[in-house]
Image (cartoon, rainbow, N blue to C red):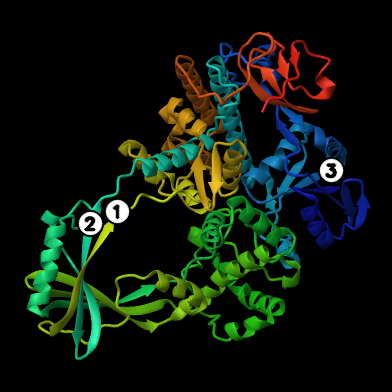
Amino acid sequence: MKLFLCEKPSQGRDIATVLGAKEKKGGYLSGAGVAVTWGFGHLLEQASPDAYGEQFGKPWRTEVLPVLPTQWQMQVKPESKVQFEVIKKLLLKAECVVIATDADREGEVIAREILDYCGYQGRVERLWLSALDEASVRAALAAIKPGHETYPYYLAGLGRSRADWQIGMNLTRLYTVKARDSGYGEVLSVGRVQTPTLNLIVERDRQIAHFIPKPYFVVTLALAVNGQPFQAQWVPAVSYCDEEKRCIQQGVAQQVVQLCQQTGTASVTETETKRETLSAPLPFDLGTLQQQCSKRWGLGAQQVLDTAQALYETHKATTYPRTDCGFLPTSMLSEVPTVFSALVKSDPVLSTVLARLQPAFVSRVWNDKKITAHHGIIPTKQPCDLSKMNEVERQVYQLIRQHYLAQFLPVYEQDATRVSLLCGGQLFKTRGNIVIEPGWKVLFEKEQEADETQGDNDNAQLPPLQQGTPCQVTGAAMKSLQTKPPEHYTEGTLIAAMKNAAQFVTDPRLKKILKENAGLGTEATRAGIIETLLSRGFIVKKGKSLRASTVAGELMDILPMPLKDPGMTALWEQALDDIAEGKMSLDDFMARQSTWTTQLVEKGRAQAISITAPPSPPCPVCGGATRQRTGKSGSFWGCLRYPNCTGVINPPKSAGTRRRGVAKKNVR
């Protein structure tokens, strides 16, 4: 029997339909000599530290750290036991297992950790899916890969999981216990990726809080030639400017205004016209999609991921979303007519748009050398039902569709003219643009209108100007402006910062080692990191912006720099990529991680730590600090010295008779 192991039931049903496995069984489908079963994401999880020794159980103690497993242990999630037993029995009958989980690092781990745990020794193959529509599933089934080709993705996924476990378990326990000794009773969560991400937000908030606005001055000259008006901007001498070339001397700017008004004319000293071209934006990778949806509609990163996943799994409308690549393989050029046909069947209104496209036009998107594990997110070859999508799904789908269709229109072309002028001995510059070929921008007219509303210093079209052309001065004005602080991170701009952690690296040696695109986390995990920070109260959302809590700032102050450094964590992510590419072994990676973890624990153990504890009522037994806890029957205040002191305040009714020192106070 050939067993297909999928990531979730919906995926299993899609593949089983194509395979002809129609007979429903408990936890799987069978027929035509195959069985198709599934997980619910991960069925297994890393064992807790106490599995490696009693000394790592409760209460947490710093003197036993670090815990560094040499033989890693997994355990079946309690909620997954029934389905796990189904898969375990099927594996005993399987001559070949086809891994059909999501085609990425995490999908590889979900399947292979089950095979390893069950000791499966048979043949392994890999179904590498980019879309779940029937045509794509059939194409993938015809091109099944041998299992060894994707095995390195499993090793990289194990490295990620184990490194995160080591840092999370050791550093969270260390700093939580030390903070409790100083009176703070909550868990201080520390993570290999979440901590440097949180530090980005804390540092940005501090830059804004400590920002001191400084004035600067802009002089605009209103001009006309043969009755056609245009504007030019003053270029102040360096001696009048700050490091950003902004004039900071108000008196000088005022004198320039007066001088221009008195002079009355300006003369063109130089003109230059260049043809500029701009290629269409690429189809989306997940991070870029999250950025755009945050900017346009304020959608959260996790919301965008969930929506893109629904478009892929439920509606079969778009291809695999957890991709870090926006390019397309040249082999998919032959599929363009089929995709166009599906798009029109899904939305007949598109017929007028498609009539303007050039299907034979080959944009920069078709590049086999740029393809990573997956290509960009695009519409599938299967028609979809827009009426079954909710509003957000339709918005995201139409955005993905728009970026795909843009590939079949010419590049945008404009003639950009730059002009230098002298007025009263002062240098002014201006620029004008003439559209030669609107190209792909005809699909982005609404976005273009929004950009034009925001305004810039370009003139739509300049009058004919040549060197020596005299221009009449019709006005001169000075505007007083102030420098602005950086903006608070939104989920979209934070995703962008996480994607390019190298920009925050100042160490020249580290910067040289890091790839330009080295990031914090992966396309698949960044949204989850943000959700974790929100759920743990380290950050809060105000409108679109993300703000760090007081505790987050205090935690960043006590953590060692290597743990907060985006560049260091990006370096580890880069090492995981090397494992996936066969350039580094898992053992070497974990040896380095263990050394790093040990150093961080030793450094943290020697630190003096103080975290501001929120107000709490005193323990009714010992008079010490308490913290709010949540039990099976509700929340209550418990002594920080538990289990040495069992005092509680406002216990749940079911717990009230079991613990000593109960004080039923009305604590607010």
In front here: 2 or 208? 208
Q: Judge the density around disc 2: few (<14), some (14-19), many (≥20) Cα neighbours within 10 Å.
A: some
Q: Which mark is residue 94?
A: 3
* Residue 537 percent location from the top left of the image: 58, 36
Q: Is residue 577 visible?
A: yes
Q: Judge the density around disc 1: few (<14), some (14-19), many (≥20) Cα neighbours within 10 Å.
A: few
Dot 1 amino acid type: Thr
- Element at label 2: strand
Circle 3 or circle 1, nearest the eye: 1
Location of residue 655 by image quarter = top right
* Residue 433 percent location from the top left of the image: 31, 79
Dot 2 and dot 1 residues touching (CB under 8 Å) = yes
Q: Residue at x 84, y 15 (%)?
A: 657
121 relative to 287 in the view: left or right? right
Q: Considering the image in quadrants, where does the C terminus appear?
A: top right
Q: Residue furthest bottom?
A: 226
Dot 2 amino acid type: Tyr
Q: Which mark is residue 483?
A: 1
| Mark 2 and mark 1: Cα distance apart in space | 7 Å
Dot 3 amino acid type: Ala
- Element at label 3: loop
In front here: 231 or 33? 231
140 relative to 10 in the view: left or right? left
Dot 2 and dot 3 residues touching (CB under 8 Å) = no
* Residue 394 percent location from the top left of the image: 66, 67
Q: Is residue 73 visible?
A: no
Q: Residue at x 30, y 45 (%)?
A: 212
Q: Which mark is residue 216?
A: 2
Above or below, 177 against 512 in this view is: above
Q: Residue at x 33, y 36 (%)?
A: 507
Q: Residue at x 36, y 82 (%)?
A: 435
Circle 2 or circle 3, nearest the eye: 2
